[in-house]
Image (spheres, grey):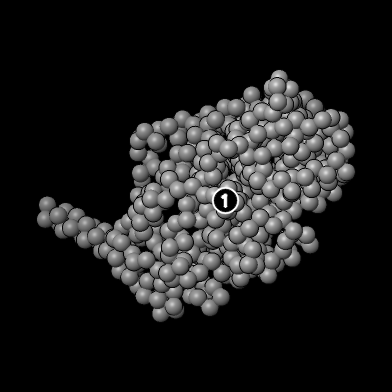
Amino acid sequence: MGAVVVALAVVVVSWLWAALVHLVWRPYAVARAFARQGVRGPAYRFFVGNNEEAKAMRAATSGETLDLRSHDFIPRVLPHCRKWMSHYGKVFLSWTGSTPTLFVGDYDMVKRILSDRAGLYGKTDPGPDIMALLGMGLVFNEGDDWARHRRVVHPAFAMDKLKMMTGAMAACAGEVIRAWEARATAATSGEVTVEVGQLFTELTADVISHTAFGSSYRQGKDVFLAQRELQFIAFASINNVRIPGTQYAPTKANVRRWQLERKVRGTLMAIIDERLAAAKEARGYGTDLLGLMLEANSDSAAAATAGGDHRRIMNMDEIIDECKTFFFAGHDTTSHLLTWAMFLLGTHPEWQKRLREEVLRECGGTEAPLHGDALNKLKLVTMVLYETLRLYGAVTMIGRRAMADADLCGVKVPKGTVLLIPIAMLHRDEEVWGADAGEFNPLRFRDGVGRAAAHPSALLSFSVGPRSCIGQDFAMLEAKATLAMILRRFAFEVAPEYVHAPADFLTLRPMQGLPVMLKLLDP
């Protein structure tokens, strides 16, 4: 009995010592090491780090609104970043629980992190809530798994394949626009007010349903609604201290997440099974994104069988995870790009007029069909979309983790440190973007993205380097097609009841939607 007590005491003491090292000694040592290098930040608080401070600052600014001509939403959305950066500089240390978190507001450091090919700066652990939303696809995979997924998925995003999807994109947008036309025609004034944010969300979900899964929004609605709820579950937990094992506890949030995960998987599995059955009957996999991915995977499987290398193949769970990524990333970020582009054009009528003239010149009138080659000639539209991404990019911050001790442009970063890149703040850096960094000026992109700022990789909305977004051409093509169709039929302005209060729910959106007054143009 005595031996058992002694053994138990040893275990308890060992556990307490490990906890003391992790929660007290290491944070102190890491903070001291960074301070010796001139990198400081808010003081570490036992166990919770700076999470509670950040949450309190966000809550304090959540009721603030902006003037329509102001694009500086940082004090509203990232007040803690603004405060700490003003006190400690562009590079500072904070704490997510007991994890050291280095805010990297220096473009040279950002380039070093994002251009890494050696696996030194890996993706951060997204946690179970975000994993349920996006799956373990290209977004979070690392090393050989990432390369294997990229090899299978990449053919689906080749430009020649995307151009073939322009018709489906235009057809989906056409349904929405015809509904607007009917409402405007019925109105005596020829004008109608529409909340475009939710409509763009449904439109882009319809587009990704058609182009990725060969189905309609109604058929993919279960996935859409489930992922929407998963997104809010993930956002609600984003600043919580993560305690190991709690993701398995049958809490209300966890039970709901498990239910939604099963619904998403079941819906996607049914779609995939139909494709596999069609392929067995020699009808092919289809020409949409899912079909192209399944075909590429089948080709990899054949090559693996011939060469004995089965590491090239994606299994069914991995295909489902990529489908989750397709569906969420393929509609959520694009819907916000369209929403904010409408806001900017609705508050800058001179630019709206210039874009309309370009669209009519390059794409023809309302009856002319849209095609990819014409959309690629829309230089002004492209410039406005890039400026929209700069000022109102869907993702305000991205993270990486030091997988080993690293030297980051002269700053020694210990293994396990999280590196946060505040994209929204970098996009407003006057040293890089000029004195007008806070203003809407699409002409800064007249010579292309690489020459828009003092740093060639300054626009980070799609990231840069080997892990840049594989779907960026898809998003830009869809946004061009939708905007072109709207500009041909309507003049618009932001409605008086609009409240300018950008909010970050994993992606940036207007807090209360975007009501827009549409005026039907003469045919």
Decide if residue 292 is in sight here.
no
Residue 206 coordinates in the image, percent (x, y): 67, 31
Query: To which residue does mark 1 refer?
Result: 395
Which residue appears at 38% of the width and 50% of the height?
60
The furthest residue to the front: 189
Mark 1 closeness class: few <14, some 14–19, many ≥20 residues within 10 Å: many
- Quadrant in the picture for residue 293: top right
Quadrant occupied by the C terminus? top right
Residue 126 coordinates in the image, percent (x, y): 49, 50
Look at label 1 and name its amino acid. Val
SS for dot 1: loop
Instruction: From this view, report whether residue 382 is shown above or below residue 32.
Output: above
For residue 361, side relative to residue 251 (left or right)? right
Instruction: From this view, report whether residue 236 is shown above or below residue 441.
Output: above
Instruction: From this view, report whether residue 137 is shown above or below residue 21.
Output: above
Which residue appears at 14% of the width and 55% of the height?
5
Which residue appears at 79% of the width and 62% of the height?
447
- Front one among 522 and 133: 522
- Quadrant in the picture for residue 475: top right
